[in-house]
Image (cartoon, rainbow, N blue to C red):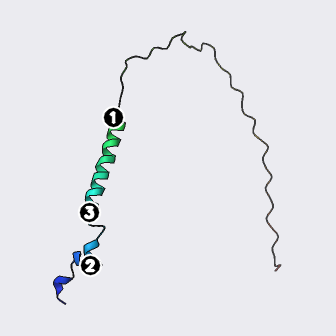
Amino acid sequence: MSHESFTLRNRVKYAKSNVLHDTTPIFSFGLLTSLGMVLIAFSWTKMDGVTFVPGPKFTLDETIELTPTILPPSIPKVPPPHPLFSK
């Protein structure tokens, strides 16, 4: 066998039925389509101007007092286990 027969193209087991031959254009088309959809989705804006909310404005003039949180009692620590073997 000559050295020229060991190319990457000849490493395919069945050269006539190589299913991965046309995958690069398909993946490129999918990548471009998905990136285009992402760009369209993130740049989609609808400017209506100022949003008008009918009714009185909500203002809070009084102060709210917060009560301190009561902490639960601390859990006592468990003593260490007794040694299995005494010295």
Badge 1 density bin: few <14, some 14–19, many ≥20, Cα 10 Å: few
Residue position for label 2: 11
Q: Which mark is residue 43?
A: 1
Badges 3 and 1: C-beta atoms under 8 Å apart?
Answer: no
Badge 2 density bin: few <14, some 14–19, many ≥20, Cα 10 Å: few
Could you say where residue 27 lies in the image, as x and y percent from the top left? 30, 57
Residue position for label 3: 22
Question: Which residue is found at the position 78% from the left and 47% from the top?
Answer: 74
Compared across the picture, whether 28 is left or right of 77 comes to left
Query: Looking at the image, which is closer to me, 5 or 21?
Result: 21
Residue type at tag 3: Asp
Could you say where residue 64 lies in the image, as x and y percent from the top left? 66, 20
Residue type at tag 2: Arg
Tell me: residue 78, above or below residue 52: below
Label whose residue precedes the other's in the sequence (3 or 2): 2
Quarter of the figure with residue 36: top left
Quarter of the figure with residue 12: bottom left
Circle 1: element type = loop
Question: Which residue is found at the position 22% from the left and 75% from the top?
Answer: 9
Badges 3 and 2: C-beta atoms under 8 Å apart?
Answer: no
